[in-house]
Amino acid sequence: MTDFISSARAAERALRDLFEPTPLQRNDHLSEKFSADIWLKREDLTPVRSYKIRGAHTAMRTVLERDPSQEVFVCASAGNHAQGVAFACRHFGVRGVIFMPVTTPQQKIDKTRVFGGDAVEIRLIGDYFDDTLASAKDYCQQAGGHFLSPFDDADVIRGQASVAVELLAQMEQAPDMLILPVGGGGLSSGITRYFSSEAPGTELYYVEPKGGRSLAAAVTAGHPVKLDHVDSFVDGAAVARIGDQTFEQLRGVAPDHILASPEDRICTAMLEMLNLEGIVLEPAGAMSIDCLEDLRHEIRGKTVVCVTSGGNFDFQRLPEVKERSQRFLELKKYFILRMPQRPGALRDFLELLGPEDDIARFEYLKKSARNFGSVLIGIETRNAANFQNLFARLDAAGLTYRDITGDETVAEFIL
């Protein structure tokens, strides 16, 4: 343990060649909302807008100290890890080969190229990440490169633990509670190991996306397991299998300290922080804030730190985020209505809408009978209770309809 603590501190000192400690900021809005003293460790404010630069820099520095002749570093990533590796390659003056899926958004490719400059080569291979990863490892063997794992690497874990070193140095005393986002486990395992020695009195909570609970599955099974399905919306934490090395540090976590953030609710947290605080967070970066709703009673009156792990958000996704948030808050619903095919039928339906109801979508799907047609309707409103009133009026009018808002199968093909 002593070696880990000293190496985490050494990693933190070495990072000062790249950037100052990320801010630890008290958030008045969240503190008032939850009647607690809530602070944000702003990992979204590193040079690459995520904590991933810490592990990439530490691992690369360690390898080069051990073998100065190592010239090629390889990784497979479609996001923050790629950007951290690219930045570190340029810093150390080594060559980086970064493999990305063909489907990677151009914005992420461009940012990786900007951070790496002439030091990196980007290869777009594979429609799915597993194919990309296999190609990266094959190339690594052929070229004699060093493969940099995004999380399942001892040097990477030490680098991510530098967050804990900074955090405790920035506070007069350790917080009562620390909330950590979990994907592959690099950040959470590094911080957990550091806190277990240096701040054992702090209560740690872990939060995963509801559609990718790899830590919870591993704790239940007693070993890492691969999830059958992962919701990719929280792309910074949507990991099908937690790392072997990271799980060794997390296997003792109590199941009730592993929280699940619904993807649609995360969207609400993202919009809240953007609109009220001017803080841009990616879905994974907002998870530690989102789960405060689940801990409302536990955190009251306590000092709580949330690690906001990243802010690489593509604003082209903002309409989707808003849509998912509205659906979670039940301010927007979709339903299929069986509409009579007669003059005045549409007017009769419009008269059933309340003063705060707005049609966001109206589309004839097909005629289900000679005298009726199926219509897809999206309604936005200002108060969730308005929908109960609307449905009551539809029932009273004898109209047949089906609410498909929560039907994932139907929504996937229609909405």
Image (cartoon, rainbow, N blue to C red):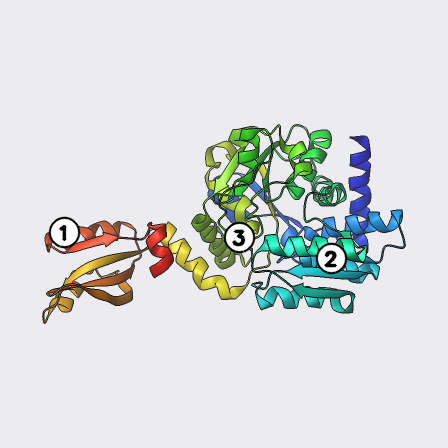
Q: Secondary structure at mark 2?
A: helix
Q: Is residue 388 left or right of residue 62?
A: left
Which mark is first along the chain, 2 or 3?
2
Residue 272 can be seen in this image? yes
Per the rendering, the mark at residue 283 is: 3
Q: How far from the left and from the top, in percent, is residue 84?
A: 71, 56
Assess disc 1: are there few (<14), some (14-19) or many (≥20) residues with their C-alpha within 10 Å of its C-alpha. Answer: few
Separation (CA) of disc 1 from disc 2: 63 Å
Q: Disc 3 residue type?
A: Pro
Separation (CA) of disc 3 from disc 2: 31 Å
Q: Secondary structure at mark 3?
A: helix
Q: How far from the left and from the top, in percent, is residue 4?
A: 78, 35
Which residue carries the number 1 mark?
A: 395
> Between tags 1 and 2, which lies in front?
2
Between 165 and 365, which is closer to the camera in this rendering?
A: 365
**Quadrant where the image shows the N terminus:** top right
Q: Disc 2 residue type?
A: Tyr
Per the rendering, the mark at residue 78 is: none
* Residue located at (57% from left, 50% from top): 285
Q: Secondary structure at mark 1?
A: helix
Which residue carries the number 2 mark?
A: 139
Between 317 and 97, which is closer to the camera in this rendering?
A: 97
Residue 399 in which image quadrant: bottom left
